[in-house]
Image (tube, helix red, strand yellow):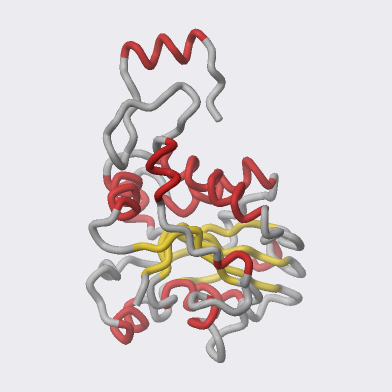
Amino acid sequence: MLTMNWWTRILDFISPRLCVVCGERLSPTERSICSVCLLHLPRTTYQFTPDDNPMAQLFWHLTPVKRAAALLYYEPHSELARLIYDLKYHDRPDIGEDMGRLMANEMQLARFFDGIDVLLPVPLSRKRLRQRGYNQSEQLAIGVSDITHLPVVTKALRRKHFVKSQTRLSRHERQENVEDMFELLDGSLLQGKHVLLIDDICTTGATLIACVDVLKNILGIRLSVLTLGFTKT
């Protein structure tokens, strides 16, 4: 929550902050999204069944993921789609941090973070990072860290290159697009730890599976997954 002080009130008067979903003016205690829009975002409640839900099932028999959850359902042209578009393409890293805090607050109710040691945001390619100026998944992780106080690790995994967006690809094309996409830089940072991978959207799980495939042979590692949105199929 924002501190309701005179400085905040003055800034809001000079340059009003607007809800990224409905465009209405935010109150001094609201961040990125107003209370009404926040209430109506479609929750998955997957955090209450983290080892057996439609998202977790994407990883069954493919890769060793302990638990998996997304906070919200994602659909094209929805409120969440507009929010993520602003986060990624309109220079709004603050949206990522705000939604990360929301994720953490709601996931904590289900004890989703119990036993987690570190947060690992899915990395961007250097080209994408230069274009955008920040990694939206890292911004989400920073927000989660603000609430959980878990450390964010960014030096263990690297995305080697960017081929093309996953948005319009089929399941098979998504898997091919991320094949050999990631490489391990420093496995010692994750050795013996329960690592929570964080990304913005999970559709087929291809990107997350590609990350897990690189990480899974680190000695003593355990892996779980958290995303802001999950695409209904």
Q: Nearer the viewer, residue 180 or 59?
A: 59
The picture places residue 75, in percent across and down from the top left corner, at 31, 63
Q: Quadrant of the N terminus?
A: top right
From where the camera sits, is residue 179 visible? Answer: yes
At 23% from the left edge and 57% from the top edge, which residue is drawn? 77
Left or right position of 37 against 198? left
Q: Quadrant of the C terminus?
A: bottom left
Image vertical order of residue 90 relative to residue 153, above or below: above
At 62% from the left edge and 71% from the top edge, which residue is drawn? 50
Q: Nearer the viewer, residue 233 or 113?
A: 233
The picture places residue 194, in percent across and down from the top left corner, at 71, 67
The picture places residue 185, in percent across and down from the top left corner, at 57, 65
At 69% from the left edge and 65% from the top edge, which residue is drawn? 190
From where the camera sits, is residue 131 visible? Answer: no
The picture places residue 101, in percent across and down from the top left corner, at 56, 44
Q: Nearer the viewer, residue 98 or 180?
A: 98
